[in-house]
Amino acid sequence: MGNRFQNLQNAVYYLDHIIGKVDMVSPVYQSKAWGFDGNDFLNAVISVKTRFTAHEVLRKTQYIEKQLLRTHKSQNQIYSNRTIDIDLLYFNDKIINDKQLTVPHPHLHRRNFVLYPLNDILPGFFHPVLRKSTKELVSLSPDKNQPRLTDFKLKTQREIPFNFIAIEGNIGAGKTTFATRFAEDFNAKLVLERFEENAFLPKFYEDPKRYAFPLEMSFLADRYQQLSDDLSQYDLFKTSVVSDYFVFKSLIFSKVTLTDDEYALYRKIFNFMYKDLVKPDLYIYLYQNVDRLLQNIKKRGREYEKTIQADYLEQIHEGYMNFIKTQKDLNILILDISDIDFVKNPEFYHKMVQMIFNHTASPGQLVIKKV
């Protein structure tokens, strides 16, 4: 039901992100409804490499079906039209038969709409119960319906709709964790801030007044150099760039840490450097409340962060908000993650990903989404 091909494509994206790497995708076939009088179906078969068990895969496919608005049939219905239906055909050569799951799928050898696309990607795979290859099962199939090959082509990986995404947030908000996973999932070039290499950082937390200006100047120089180098190098194998910071961060932190005279000088140098940098197509701010930030900071156990206080984090957040409100040329998305843990619960991570892909606002329009 609905946009049938897009439903299939979205299912492939979900499977690739949630269950494992999709390494083979069949052509898409159109076939008559099987077992009931309904709309024509589109079908495809994919091969996935996963670290999960078969029963974990089953639960995750049910979650994906729910995300794609699958409504399950009533008790008196055997088959019905649907937006998506994800079946587990094989799990290596395992044989599973319990209340939750039967593998191999008990009907796959009797359905051409399964056998045809399966034969396109795994003609030599042996059914562990019937002991016949896919090619042999096609020739022996009792199904008289002939699926029709379509022109639809499924992609194995979703492309980020932005060339350059900067992901920022307060200290301990999870921006590096999210940026790293997001870039890895979507084959983007990852640019991470090299803060641990900064010799002034531990000194600053011990004596902020003395080391604030050299710290901010060293950060500015390093951020400018890193972004200039990374954003100027075109990577043939990456479609986008994802960074866990942008040079704007320098203004926000320096406003909090520097005196008025120091900040005035710092701003002049910043303006000179900033005009040469590529600007992000999407600027994401991860909002996290201060209590959670302090918990995260304590959990990661960096020695030099032990003295960070709640009021300092509040000032940093206010600095980000004041900066964001003044930006008329940036495409900004604020994700409120104060009530969720996207590391422990992958469903929240995937919800954040969907919010990014669905973001269509124009520069100057501030969009806030609660995850």
Image: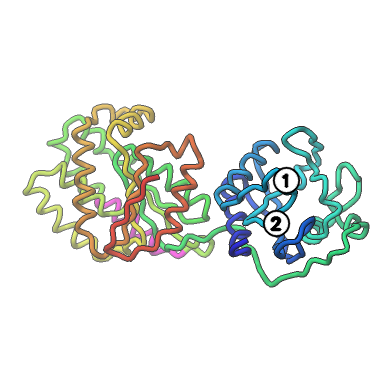
Which span of residues is magenta-colored? 220-234
Q: Position of residue 157 (x, y in %)?
A: 58, 58
Q: Is the magenta region chiefly helix, strand or loop? A: helix
Colour scheme in use? rainbow
Question: What is the three-letter code of the residue carrying label 1?
Answer: Asn
Decide: few, some or many residues near mark 2? Use Cα within 10 Å; few <14, some 14-19, many ≥20.
Answer: some
Residues under numbered marks 1 and 2 in contact, where contact means CB atoms less than 8 Å apart: no
How far is disc 1 from disc 2 in space, using C-alphas? Answer: 36 Å
Q: Position of residue 305 (x, y in %)?
A: 28, 31
Q: Which mark is residue 182?
A: none
Would you say 224 lies left or right of 8 here? left
Confirm whether the magenta stretch covers residue 276: no
Would you say 175 lies left or right of 150 here? left
Residue that extends furthest to the right in the rendered view of this protein:
140
The residue under the point 81% across, 61% down is 116
Q: Position of residue 204 (x, y in %)?
A: 20, 35
The residue under the point 91% across, 45% down is 130
Asked which secondary structure carries label 2, the reply is strand
Residue 215 can be seen, yes or no? yes
Q: Which mark is residue 24?
A: 2
Residue linked to disc 1: 76
